[in-house]
Image: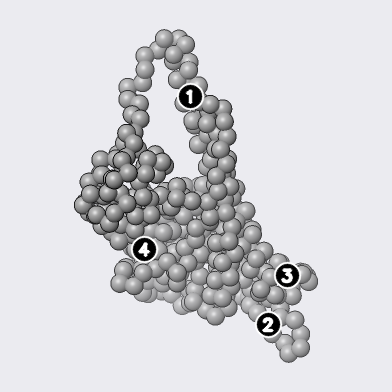
Amino acid sequence: FLSYRWDPLDSDFVAKVNDCLLSRSLVRRQHDVSTDTFTVTTSRVETFLDKQRLQEGRNFQTDFMMALSVSTVACPIVSVASLTPLTLLTESSACDNVLLEWSLMVELQEQNPEFRIVPVFMGPIREVPEEPVQMSNLFLDCDVFSNIPDVVVRSVNDRVLEFFTSQGLTYSQNVRSRSVATVVQRLRSNLGVQVWNLGTDVSSRSSTFNLSGVHMTCGKKIFEVLEASEGEKHEKSEASASTSTTTATLRSRVGVGAPTTAPVPVPVPIETAHPWNELNVDSVVQLFGQWFPKYNCETLQDNGVDGHLLVKLISEHKLEALLGLTPLQSMKVATEFEKCSH
């Protein structure tokens, strides 16, 4: 999730980083404990960039908050452009969308330590005729941090609380009392990318700044964090599966009764003429309602379900009311099918 304020430099930089991330793929090595075999799969990196993902006619705040809540890594662009408007905020200010995104990031990380925040720090640009463009150190050459107010913006915190409540998610007691200064400080406490140090002529205060080259290095660093995070999730999943298999084996050896949860039945193959591949909403909803509680997305995909169709229907919000899914659950289902389809 790429978070930034609409500023010419920041917007251009984020667009280039986004393109860099979209060109990469995650490689997953899956271990089937029962057969002791490994399968290697690849899937492209998915990003959320507002100008590409938000849709006209929809509540953009709700949509970007849902996207952020299902992201693995959040990348806030911390720059003079993004910070300066925050210095003017008061307790009664209108909701600032950048602060809203940052506040949600902080709360998500507080609820789940595995949620990664990789701040991208960008210093002010100094341009001198006939000299290389310089990017200054944001922390040394700018006093914007000292001007961040220690005030609680009610409109922002209320919106975060409203989102967590509407999605049935737990939240901390700090949601209501978190100030602007606290949010910014929490972002700074995460090890991030200092763009001025990505140049070729690095000094203690600034570096030769080549935007076309720096964004690739920045994208690479963000991808490495995403790759590490996905790897940790995979290792935990495999460890859990291995533990379950070992427990089942021990149960059978010592004569312990079978667990109370019935095993998932082997799915019946779907006939070729099945209406999954037709834009028949009623049939799709009926079948999806029968299958989804029993089988995961990969099982459905393997049995002929058109994942792209489901993603389309989910994105058009045709399944939510009929199946009783919350928007967040709907987005998670869409994400799972996207992974399967790759």
Cβ atoms under marks 2 and 3 closer than 8 Å: no
Q: CA distance from mark 2 to mark 3?
A: 14 Å
Instruction: Say left or right for 294 vs 51.
Output: left
Q: Which residue is mark 1?
A: 245
- First in residue order: circle 2 vs circle 3: 2
| Residue 241 vs residue 3, the one in the foreground | 241
Q: Which residue is mark 4?
A: 63
Asked if one can make out residue 149 in the rendered structure from this viewpoint, the answer is yes
Considering the numbered disc 4 on the image, is that residue within a helix, a strand or a loop? helix
> Which residue is at a point 75% across and 81% down the rendered structure image?
132
- First in residue order: circle 1 vs circle 2: 2
List x then y, in percent, for residue 265: 33, 29
- Label 2 neighbour load within 10 Å: few <14, some 14-19, many 20+: few
Q: Which residue is mark 2?
A: 126
Q: Which residue is mark 3?
A: 199
- First in residue order: circle 4 vs circle 1: 4
> Which residue is at a point 32% across and 40% down the rendered structure image?
270
Considering the numbered disc 2 on the image, is that residue within a helix, a strand or a loop? strand
Q: Amino acid under label 1?
A: Thr
